[in-house]
Every structure is written in C-alpha cells, then in structure tokens.
Amino acid sequence: MRWFGILLIVFNVAAGAGFVYLSTQDWKGRQTINAAGVRHILVLTGLPVDPPPGAPEGFDPEETPFILEMGGGESTKTISQKLLESYFTTHTKKGNADPPAATDPPLLMPSGKIPLSVQDPVTHQIAEVKRVQAIIKAELDKEIPAAETLTFMQERIGLLRGWLLNQAETIDVRVEYLALLSPTDAAGQPKTVDRLKADATKLRELLDARFAAVLAKPARTENPVDPGEKTAPDYAEKKLKIDAMPEKDRLAKSAEWRAAVQDDTQRRMLIAHLLVHLEPDANWQKRVMIVVGLRRYVKAVSLQVVRFADMTNQIERYVPNDQAAFTKHENQLRDRAIRNAERARAVAEIRVALNAQKIAKDDAVNRQRTQLKLLTDQLTKLKNEVDEKLVRQTEIETELFETQREVALTLEEVYRLEALLAAVERERHGLLPQTK
C-alpha cells in the first residue's frame, strides 16, 4: 500500500500539473484569440465613442473599462493598456508623412505644418477629439508678434484653411469658407491686418463649433417644424403655428434641428467626418482609420465624395448661367468700348483741327504783335519828337513873350515921351494944355 500510495500521489501531482499547464495554455489561447478578435473589431468599428459610465479618463493601472461589442451578442468589459498600445503602435506612425511629390497642377491641400498623428493610444474617440482640439488650440493661442503681424496672420489662416476647408458639406458653406480664407476682399484688394484678424477669428469660431458639435452628447429633440401624428391632441395647434411661420424661419429651424446630434450613430459619423477632413496627411489618415474604424472611415470619405460631386454638379450648372451673364456683360462692355473709341477718334480729329486753328491763330497773333510793336515803336518815336518840339515851342513862346513885353514897355515909354513932347510944345507956343 505504501508504494502504491506514493505512486498515486505522484500521478495526481503530475495530473494536476498537466491540468494547470493545459488550463494556462487554454487561457493564453483564449486571450490571444480574444485579443485578435478585439483587434479585428477595432479595425472595423473603431474605438467606443465615450468611456463607460463612471470610468476614469485614460488608462487604469490594472484593467481599463472598455465596452466593445463582440460576436454572439457578447461584449468586452475591460482592456489592457498593453493591447491598445500594441494596436496603435502597429497601425500608426508619429508625425507627418513625407510631403507628396510635386504635381501639375499642385495639390490644393498639402500636408499641414502641425503634426496631429502620434502613436500614443486613447481609450475612446472623444479622447482623441479632445487631444486634437488641444493641439489646435495651443497653436491658435500663440501670441501674435508685433513685428510680423501680417505674415503671422497669413500663416494662421493657412493652418485654418487646412483644418476647415475640406469640412464643408455644401457649396454655400465652402464658398463662405473660401471668402474668409482668401487674402483679398470682394473688390480684389489685399486685406488689411485688421480684416485678416477678424477673418481668422471667424474661422476659429467655425472650427470650434464643429468640435463642440461632436463633443456634445446626443439629445433627441422634437422637430420644431413637424406637427407630429395627426391623432395627437395638439396636432392642429402645432400645424397652425408651423403654417404661420415664414418660409425662411421654417427652413432655418429645420436645418438647426437636423444639425443637432440625435443618436450615437450620427455622433460617430460626425466624429469620423471631423477627424478625416482635418488633415490629408497619410500618417494622420491611418490613425483616424483605427480610431473611428474602417467602416465609418470609408463611409465618411464616400459621403464627402458624394458631397464634392454635388458641389461640382452645382458649379457646372452655374457655369452656363455665369458664362451667359459674362458674355452679355462682355458684349455690353465691347459695345461701350467701340462707342468710346469712335468718340475718342472724333475728339482726336477735332483736337487736331483745333490745334491747326490754334497754330494759325497763334501765327496771326504773333504777326499782329510784331506789327503792334513796330507801330508802338513809331508812336513812341513820334511822341518823343513831339515832346521835343513842344519843349522847343514853349521856349520860343517864352522868348516871344519876353520880346513882346519889351516892345510893350518900349511903346509905353515912346507914348509917354510923345505926350511929354506935346506938352512942352504947347507950353512953348502958349497953348493951353490938352485935356484928355
């Protein structure tokens, strides 16, 4: 019995060790299979949108809460940090990829200057959105250097162009973005620094609104322009209120309601759309694929392709009308140019004739001025001669006056002497004096 018992104990110990070994190998196999299944599901569907209720942000030192639907209606409850690190390290690269080769025409959206791709794992999609938002916010919050304000604002708008332009879902939104991103205003003049700052602020508000839309939790709300079921007690009242709305307000309220996140599926698509079109860099696109999942990545890209096709079709529909309007305007301008050219030619001919008349008149005036100068010179000469003769005449008249005065004085003396002689003779002959 003693040796049999020892052999039995040894056999039981060996059987137990074998059972433990087989159980360990089975557990490892199950873990490997489960990890492979998790990786497969993650590649297809992506990370969960939000962490489980009550779960902390980031990784737990032991097991991180992680709910992922698997096959057969089962779902994971936790995940190891090592598995997610391996998943991200295998499928992602850090930094931007090499710039694409030069193309003709060049690519509209080259790789951005700010790398968004890293190999650090995240536990849910909202964590990735917040990580990217923090990178963008840190870049946009940089202080503007006073010495290089214009260049800095142009670079900032260039960054916003890469992050925002491809997010547009309609041609109207894209045109709005392009107007804000353009370095020139509607008149074709370069924008001032203040205008660039205002446009950059508006672009950032639009980008922040897109981040806010995906960070907001789904909240089902009643459509403000849908009266609901006809059997509802307030159907008639709602319908009258909706019918009384202006068409513009009705469309605006409907668009606002459609833009709100209604469920988790729509939120996933918004996240995929935001992340996919933030940056065309290859490394970033690989990271987005494993964060949102290939299914929604492909769907987001496909939907945007359809939107771009619609934009192209709208542009193509606009082209004939714009071409007709352009042709009409061009014809009007050409006719006006022809009329103005004919008028300019007539004015030029009149100008030539008037110039010829002016030259002839100027010649006549010059001749008359020459003749006038000759006559003026002659007149001056005659006036000088007359002045000289008048002076001579004045001198002669003065001399004549003196002569006449002397003659008068002489005659007066003669008359006196003659009277005196007569008086003396009368007195000598005894005649009475002659009375006057």
Image (tube, rainbow, N blue to C red):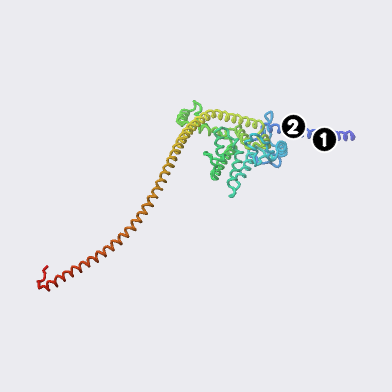
Dot 2 amino acid type: Ile
> Residue, x 24% and y 64% (percent of image)?
404
- In the displayed structure, would residue 45 be above or below residue 205? above
Nearer-the-camera pick, 303 or 153: 153
Q: Position of residue 188 (x, y in %)?
A: 53, 39
At label 2, counting other C-alpha atoms closer than 10 Å, the crowd grade (few under 14, some 14-19, many 20 or more) is: few
Quadrant occupied by the C terminus = bottom left
Q: Position of residue 403 (x, y in %)?
A: 26, 64
Tell me if 284 is positioned left or right of 174 in this view: right
Tell me if 377 is positioned left or right of 12 in this view: left
Tell me if 236 is positioned left or right of 311 in this view: left
Check disc 1 and report the residue beneath it.
17
- In the displayed structure, would residue 154 be above or below residue 41? below
- In the displayed structure, would residue 388 be above or below residue 23? below
Quadrant occupied by the N terminus = top right
- Indicate the secondary structure of the residue bearing disc 2: helix
